[in-house]
């Protein structure tokens, strides 16, 4: 069995790569980072170090590595004969890997079992985003891949992936430090009984509750910790959790998303409360060298309409509930000025160069008539003055 995995970074090597290796797949890593691909191509194995309670080390081998920028045809040829394609590149990068996947599907022998395609990104239904791009690229490409051919040759399944994998320390080589916890939930319905056998994966009939719970608890809480921690001058996520001022605000944010998740899905209050407590303990893991700068990265994406703050806050507002803590977190996100983050700079320019209402629409995608709009517009107006 062979999978082509786009994105040989933190989650690619430390989670998706590990689980697929353990499931018996040969992995072909495809990435545009030349030095990383050269190092992977020259290596026989790397280690995944799980830190925290019950630490462990796992070795990943049986992989190859290809540079998808300089050797796209080789990647297409691998996809043409692969069983699976996975991605962990970031939601905004999916459109750049889609053309290669479309070409790979077009080049497949029609007698092969359908290619199983899964985007492992932090976004609601990331695989749908990838599928749409693959279909559009396929139709416009030289092989004129029509919808029926895609239907026959590929299966697209949405997933929710959860494991905290920080940026790796310089000099660590290919080894990855991760937390011990992981969860990978996959929509089983597209496979019609032929889902892949991957140890540790949970297949579900309805993914929406799981992806929303993950994004609006783990990622909402994580980003809130990052932005409140950044405002308090704290570098590490676990240190931010030690700060009583930060911790109380993060808990308040998660109480608001709990209200939404419990009302909307089939989770009981107690179940969601236990989920929240477990997540807060994960953030506090002192062995995990995770930073507010990594977790707060790309604030423009994180302030998007269906993302971790505006998504739940908008839905609460639509239900007649005025979020308070979530809006405070949005206010902190608007002041995330990490000099190394291109999106933080773009966010600051949008705030500075536009009237508050126009900036609100552009940053959050909220329509002016939306009940959350005035509160966010006021936050953006306030952020103009510091
Ligand atoms: N790190 C985590 O804790 C974690 C957990 C769950 C989900 N995720 C999600 O996984 C995705 C990746 O996150 P990460 O932390 O591994 O980031 P990362 O930056 O460590 O890895 C991303 C990799 O994608 C590569 N890449 C960029 N453009 C590419 C392209 N056009 N083609 C091929 N490769 C390309 C980069 O070179 C990099 O190696 C994101 O969507 C993130 O939200 C991350
Ligand atoms: O990857 P992002 O930028 O969407 O979010 C940053 C972190 O919250 C995220 O990577 C978490 O570590 C991860 O989602 C845990 O499963």
Image (spheres, grey):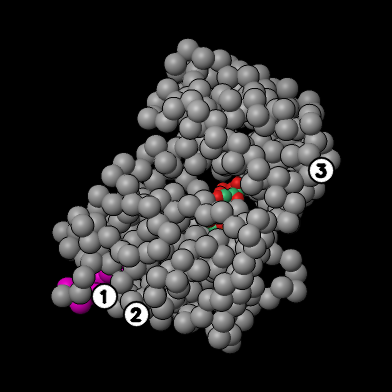
Residue 117 appears in which quarter of the rendering? bottom left
Mark 2 or 3, which is nearer the eye? Answer: 3
Element type at mark 2:
helix
- Compute the Cα span from label 1 to label 3: 51 Å
Residue pushed farthest right? 233
| Pointer 1 local density, CA inside 10 Å: few below 14, some 14–19, many at least 20 | some
Mark 1 or 3, which is nearer the eye? Answer: 3
Tag 1 residue: 107
Q: Nearer the viewer, residue 111 or 163?
A: 163
Residue 221 versus residue 185 in the image, above or below: above
**Residue under the point 70% across and 50% down:** 285
Tag 3 residue: 234
Tag 2 residue: 77
Element type at mark 1:
loop
Tell me the tag on residue 176: none
Question: Split into 4 quadrants, where in the image is the C terminus?
Answer: top right
Residues marked 1 and 3 touching at CB (< 8 Å): no
Question: Magenta part mainly helix, strand or loop?
Answer: helix
Q: Is residue 22 visible?
A: yes
- Compute the Cα span from label 2 to label 3: 47 Å
Q: Which residues are magenta?
A: 101-110
- Place of residue 274 in the rendered image (x, y in percent of width and height, measured from the top left): 54, 35
């Amino acid at each position: 069995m062979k999978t082509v995995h786009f994105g040989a970074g933190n989650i690619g090597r430390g989670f998706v790569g590990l689980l697929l290796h353990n499931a018996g797949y040969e992995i072909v890593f495809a990435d545009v980072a030349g030095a990383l691909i050269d190092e992977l191509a020259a290596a026989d194995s790397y280690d995944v170090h799980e830190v925290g309670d019950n630490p462990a080390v796992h070795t990943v081998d049986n992989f190859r590595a290809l540079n998808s920028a300089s050797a796209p045809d080789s990647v297409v040829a691998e996809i043409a004969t692969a069983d699976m394609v996975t991605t962990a590149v970031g939601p905004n990068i999916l459109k750049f890997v889609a053309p290669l996947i479309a070409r790979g599907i077009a080049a497949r022998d029609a007698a092969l079992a359908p290619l199983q395609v899964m985007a492992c990104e932090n976004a609601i239904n990331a695989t749908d985003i990838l599928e749409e791009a693959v279909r559009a690229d396929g139709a416009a490409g030289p092989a004129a891949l029509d919808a029926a051919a895609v239907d026959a040759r590929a299966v697209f399944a949405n997933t929710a992936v959860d494991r905290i994998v920080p940026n790796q320390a310089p000099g660590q080589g290919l080894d990855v430090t991760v937390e011990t916890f992981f969860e990978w939930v996959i929509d089983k319905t597209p496979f019609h009984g032929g889902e892949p056998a991957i140890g540790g994966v949970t297949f579900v009939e309805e993914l929406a509750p799981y992806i929303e719970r993950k994004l609006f608890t783990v990622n909402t809480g994580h980003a809130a910790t990052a932005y409140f921690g950044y405002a308090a001058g704290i570098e590490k996520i676990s240190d931010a959790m030690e700060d009583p001022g930060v911790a109380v605000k993060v808990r308040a944010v998660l109480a608001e998303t709990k209200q939404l998740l419990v009302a909307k899905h089939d989770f009981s209050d107690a179940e969601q409360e236990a989920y929240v407590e477990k997540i807060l303990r994960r953030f506090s893991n002192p062995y995990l060298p995770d930073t507010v700068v990594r977790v707060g990265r790309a604030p423009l994406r994180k302030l998007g309409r269906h993302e971790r703050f505006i998504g739940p806050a908008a839905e609460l507002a639509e239900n007649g509930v005025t979020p308070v803590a979530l809006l405070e977190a949005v206010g902190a996100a608007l002041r995330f000025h990490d000099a190394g983050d291109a999106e933080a700079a773009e966010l600051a320019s949008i705030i500075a160069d536009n009237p508050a209402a126009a900036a609100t629409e552009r940053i959050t995608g909220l329509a002016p008539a939306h009940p959350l709009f005035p509160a966010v517009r006021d936050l953006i107006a306030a952020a103009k003055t510091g």
